[in-house]
Amino acid sequence: MFKAVIPARHASTRLPGKPLLDIAGKPMVVRVAEQALKSGANEVLVATDHSEIEAVCKAHGLPVVMTRGDWPTGTDRIAEVIHLKGWSDDTVVVNVQGDEPLIDPALIDLVAKALLDDEQDIATCGHSIDNWEEFKNPNVVKIAMRENGEALYFSRAPIPYPRDAFASETWPSGAPTGQLGIRHIGLYAYRARFLKMYQTLPAAGIEVLESLEQLRALANGFRIKVCMIQDAPLPGVDTEQDLEKVRALFGSR
């Protein structure tokens, strides 16, 4: 059994009020919650700092927790929820991003099961990168892996770096067919005890340099299980263009 928490922040640089934007007749945060409710989670709730989001959730019968408004990340917001709800250290919590109205419920189950079945502190997802442009793109976060399926490092740089192949842009010798690297998918499951400790840890140097908060966990010795998936998940909503694509996908259903 596990919990799913959807952090929903009203402030957004590119799309203000994003959780409330309409998708086929319902606010985005409601669409996300509907997907999470199809997973195996025994509890799904929204965590927000905004009264309008709270009211929308209540109007749709969704459990909602009001949190502080000054948290820098959704991870911090979920950590507050754990304290407010009094969840035990062993509770597994999946962070379902509030801008992922097309998230596959099976993906939520996958990361939760990874922690329920093993001993890591965090679980996340990745899939193979099979083209050079994606591999070199700094907006695509890559994972270097341990042999046991745990993350060794996350970076915006192309890792592992195929030195000789990069010089000629030919397929690197020894690389698995169809795989240059592993793209990180930002879905996380956490043990509650990790989140309680996370907020006491200062930002790590590598975290600041890469602008990747998961590096704080690795820098402090926490283990991250990577669940490999076959294909990239359906898109989330970061821009107006993303919003129109998602609206079109819902409209075609």
Image: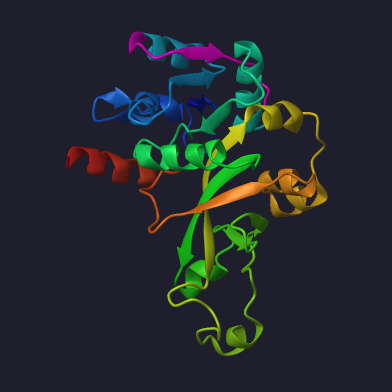
Q: Residue 166 versus residue 124: which sits nearer the camera?
A: 124
Q: Report which quarter residue 27 is drawn in.
A: top left
Does the magenta stretch mainly form a helix, a strand or a loop? Answer: loop
Q: Quarter of the image containing the C terminus?
A: top left
Q: Determine whether, in the image, residue 82 is placed left or right of residue 206.
A: left
Give the image location of residue 228, x and y in percent: 48, 56
Tell me if residue 159 is in the magenta stretch: no
Residue 114, relative to residue 144: is it above or below?
A: above
Residue at the far front in the pictured view? 117
Q: Residue at x 61, y 69 (%)?
A: 158
Q: How is the image coloured?
A: rainbow
Give the image location of residue 221, x and y in percent: 78, 46
Q: Residue at x 60, y 83 (%)?
A: 166
Residue 243 visible? The answer is: yes
Tell me if residue 61 is in the magenta stretch: yes
Q: Determine whether, in the image, residue 202 is placed left or right of residue 104.
A: right
Give the image location of residue 24, x and y in percent: 24, 30
Give the image location of residue 252, x and y in percent: 17, 42
Residue at the far bottom in the pictured view? 168
Residue 237 visible? The answer is: no
Q: Report which quarter residue 181 is drawn in.
A: bottom right
Q: Residue 14 versus residue 107: which sits nearer the camera?
A: 107
Q: Residue 137 versus residue 230: which sits nearer the camera?
A: 230
Residue 57, relative to residue 13: is it above or below?
A: above
Question: Which portion, as a residue range, is magenta?
Answer: 59-71
Q: Residue at x 63, y 12 (%)?
A: 86
Q: Residue at x 46, y 35 (%)?
A: 15
Residue at the far left in the pictured view? 252
